Structures are given as structure tokens and as C-alpha cells.
Image: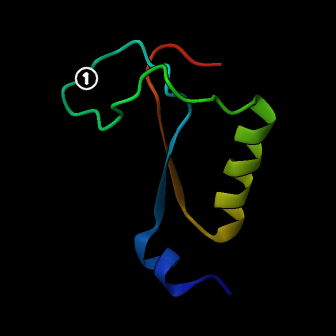
């Protein structure tokens, strides 16, 4: 059985990259190029973990330029 809190929340936000070339006013990413990026396999692994945890939606964020 899934965690009741996860069922209540229902979604997870996942930012694919910090190297976003957009500068949206609502963006909460202050770094934009300063952090180590995840590999494609690491990203797939995280998405699988989120799914397996019971989240119903994954909101993909990260902008116009990504790996």
C-alpha cells in the first residue's frame, strides 16, 4: 500500500536541468548553470522511483535546454 501522504499529494515536481536558458518570472531556480547535472540514466531512475512511490503525476520542469 502506498503512503497516505503521497496519495493525498498526488504529484511530484521534477526539474530535469538547472541549465535552463529561459528566465521565467515565476522560476524558483536561482542557479541556472552552477550545479552538476544528472545523467539520463539517473533521471530515468528518479522518475521510476517517483512512480513506484505511488505518485499519480510527475510535473516535468527545467526549460528549453536540457540533456
Residue 32, given in percent of the width and then of the height, sits at: 42, 22
- Secondary element at tag 1: loop
Q: Colour scheme used in the picture?
A: rainbow
Residue density around tag 1, few if under 14, some if 14–19, many if 20 or more, within 10 Å: few
Q: Is residue 17 left or right of residue 41?
A: left
The quarter of the picture where the C terminus appears is top right
The quarter of the picture where the N terminus appears is bottom right
Q: Is residue 20 above or below residue 44?
A: above
Image point 54% across, 28% down: which residue?
A: 17
Residue corresponding to mark 1: 24
- Work out whether residue 65 or residue 7 is closer to the camera in this orientation and state it: 65
* Residue reaching furthest to the front: 34
Residue 33, given in percent of the width and then of the height, sits at: 48, 19
Image point 21% across, 33% down: which residue?
A: 26
Q: Is residue 36 above or below residue 57?
A: above
Residue 43, given in percent of the width and then of the height, sits at: 70, 39
Looking at the image, how many numbered discs can be counted on the residues? 1
Amino acid at each position: 500500500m502506498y503512503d497516505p501522504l503521497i496519495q493525498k499529494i498526488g504529484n511530484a515536481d521534477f526539474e530535469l536541468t538547472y541549465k535552463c536558458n529561459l528566465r521565467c518570472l515565476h522560476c524558483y531556480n536561482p542557479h541556472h548553470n552552477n550545479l552538476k547535472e544528472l545523467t539520463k540514466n539517473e533521471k530515468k531512475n528518479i522518475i521510476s522511483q517517483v512512480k513506484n512511490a505511488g505518485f499519480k503525476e510527475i510535473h516535468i520542469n527545467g526549460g528549453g535546454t536540457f540533456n
